[in-house]
Image (cartoon, rainbow, N blue to C red):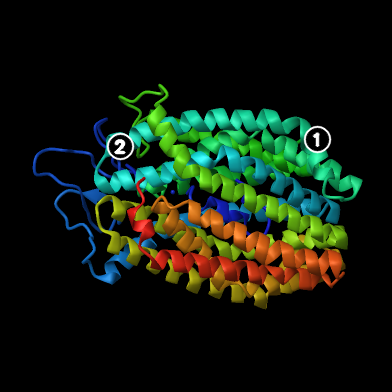
């Protein structure tokens, strides 16, 4: 599956995130989850235990970590939940690498087209994917409170809502793909290829949205391996289809940029088919028995009320990114290509950030659900520490190998040199990006989705776009100075998010 395009579009995956399940044991009875148990016999409570073969499974009779647990144990929970997501998104990033490397052989115009087409696609997906954000908060809180019937109901309503929204956004977006790309003042070749890329990606909106629902529900319930395993299978398929459709191997036509989008769309359909098969076979963390797809107005409203700020956040975010790329278009196709290549290379450091964000979302929601706000706070800060350390270390490693990494994607000397410059600038803000990942994930797990939206608006528009526009449009400054606006963006967001999480307001929000 393709990761997000652009500097930080992977941030949008924070609230939608792998598989502790029934592997090796067969499906549990319909009255139980694979993780956690829903047995409600008198005196039989839900507990959490670490075990050698399944470190995140809820079991009966073992001590469950509460607010007074040792920090080391809760820190272990963070890592246990984070690592499958890290591996899964690592594999996803490699697929995106494959997309860019294979497309890079077609020239800078193709790289720019994939970058712009992908950004517009993600702008459309922001609307269709507002549901998984609300679902993650509701399921995590319900699991913590032991209310598993609400998990089932929320999951079904999320499938229903996501289907409607995905179909609507697809039908609205399809006629305007070329026209939207043309708004950015790029060369005709980039408009044509970018429009083709966006067109075929839009056909995958429905399976993409439903996959987010399945993955988000699984992770929010604490099952972080199932999406990992499914994703690994689908990623292999995606890379194989790239090789066939981009270059025309095995008798297929050489479709170039459009082939990359087709490969991703086919892989998305395969992924959602696997998820539905697991669910209907009783091998998913949420069971298919006894529920209904009849619209539940109250629950749908709750999912949308939690999710809409995240959707607006993503709309603002991607509008801002496209505005940033519009400013860069003043510097030519090589500048846009370098920006997207550099962001793709730095996405290697985003991977642990997404993992720790997922862990924070899950644990904060579950601890709040069981009435342990201090444990929720501690889990959020532990996830933040892990994200800052890991992203900073990987960022330093990328800086050390910036040139050879840039040369993998393009043999155009101008693109390579600009990519190296961009890597150094974005690399400087890795600790700040880590804070946005982890603290933002913590707040979303608590159902506090409005404040992260506000920080995106302030950081992206006041910290990035306005300074970039002044530097690039009014002053005609060097491209590198325009890119330095990223520093102000992430500094503002990190400061605001830390201030919010240090307060008490997020601990009292209902989900």
Identify the image quadrant of the C terminus: top left
Residue 345 visible from this viewpoint: no
The correct choice, above or below, for 294 with respect to 313 in the image is: above
The correct choice, above or below, for 303 with respect to 439 in the image is: above
Residue highlighted by disc 1: 253
Relative horizontal placement of residue 501, taking residue 308 as reference (left or right): left
* The quadrant where residue 199 appears: top right
Q: Which mark is residue 26?
A: 2
Residue 46 x/y as whole percent: 19, 47
Relative horizontal placement of residue 376, taking residue 458 as reference (left or right): left
- Tag 1 secondary structure: loop
- Name the residue nearer the viewer: 27 or 30: 30
- Name the residue nearer the viewer: 36 or 274: 36
Residue 409 x/y as whole percent: 76, 61
Residue 461 x/y as whole percent: 67, 60
Q: Residue at x 29, y 59 (%)?
A: 373
Classify 10 Å Cα crowding around label 1: few (below 14), some (14-19), many (20 and above). Answer: few
* The furthest residue to the left: 43
* The furthest residue to the right: 188
Q: Residue at x 72, y 43 (%)?
A: 260
Identify the image quadrant of the N terminus: top right
- Name the residue nearer the viewer: 34 or 456: 456
Relative horizontal placement of residue 421, taking residue 448 as reference (left or right): right
């Amino acid at each position: 599956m393709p990761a997000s395009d652009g500097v930080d579009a992977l941030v949008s995956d924070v609230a939608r995130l792998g598989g502790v399940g029934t592997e090796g044991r067969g499906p549990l009875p319909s009255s139980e989850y694979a993780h956690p148990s829903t047995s409600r016999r008198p005196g039989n409570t839900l507990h959490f235990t670490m075990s050698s073969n399944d470190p995140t499974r809820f079991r009966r009779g073992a001590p469950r970590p509460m607010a007074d647990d040792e920090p080391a144990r809760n820190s272990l929970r963070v890592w246990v939940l984070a690592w499958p997501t890290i591996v899964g998104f690592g594999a996803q990033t490699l697929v995106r690498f494959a997309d860019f490397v294979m497309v890079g052989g077609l020239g800078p115009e193709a790289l720019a087209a994939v970058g712009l087409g992908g950004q517009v696609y993600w702008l459309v997906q922001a609307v269709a994917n507002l549901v998984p954000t609300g679902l993650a908060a509701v399921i995590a809180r319900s699991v913590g409170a032991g209310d598993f019937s609400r998990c089932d109901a929320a999951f079904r309503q999320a499938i229903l809502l996501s289907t409607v929204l995905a179909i609507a956004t697809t039908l609205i977006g399809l006629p305007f793909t070329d026209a939207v790309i043309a708004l950015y003042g790029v060369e005709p070749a980039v408009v044509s290829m970018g429009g083709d890329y966006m067109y075929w990606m839009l056909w995958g909106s429905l399976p993409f949205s439903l996959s987010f629902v399945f993955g988000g529900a699984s992770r929010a319930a604490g099952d972080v391996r199932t999406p990992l395993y499914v994703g690994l299978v689908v990623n292999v398929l995606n890379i194989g289809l790239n090789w066939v459709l981009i270059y025309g191997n095995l008798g297929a036509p050489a479709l170039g940029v459009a082939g990359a989008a087709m490969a991703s769309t086919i892989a998305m359909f395969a992924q959602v088919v696997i998820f539905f098969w697991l669910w209907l076979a009783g091998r998913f963390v949420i069971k298919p028995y006894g529920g209904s797809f009849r619209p539940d107005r109250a629950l749908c409203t709750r999912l949308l009320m939690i999710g809409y700020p995240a959707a607006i956040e993503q709309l603002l975010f991607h509008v801002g990114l496209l505005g940033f790329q519009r400013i860069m278009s003043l510097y030519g196709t090589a500048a846009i290509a370098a920006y997207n290549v550099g962001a793709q290379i730095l996405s290697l450091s985003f991977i642990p950030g997404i993992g720790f964000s997922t862990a924070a979302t899950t644990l904060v929601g579950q601890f709040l659900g069981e009435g342990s706000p201090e444990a929720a706070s501690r889990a959020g800060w532990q996830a933040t520490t892990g994200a800052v350390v890991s992203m900073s270390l990987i960022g330093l490693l990328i800086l050390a190998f910036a040139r050879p990494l840039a040369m993998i994607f393009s043999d155009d000397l101008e693109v390579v040199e600009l990519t190296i410059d961009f890597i150094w600038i974005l690399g400087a803000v890795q600790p700040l990006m880590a804070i946005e990942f982890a603290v933002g994930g913590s707040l979303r797990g608590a159902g506090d989705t409005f404040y992260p939206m506000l920080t995106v608006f302030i950081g992206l528009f006041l910290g990035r776009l306005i300074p970039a526009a002044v530097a690039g449009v009014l002053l005609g400054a060097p491209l590198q100075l325009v890119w330095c606006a990223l520093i102000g963006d992430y500094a503002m967001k990190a400061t605001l998010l830390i201030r919010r999480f240090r307060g008490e307001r997020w601990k009292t929000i209902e989900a």
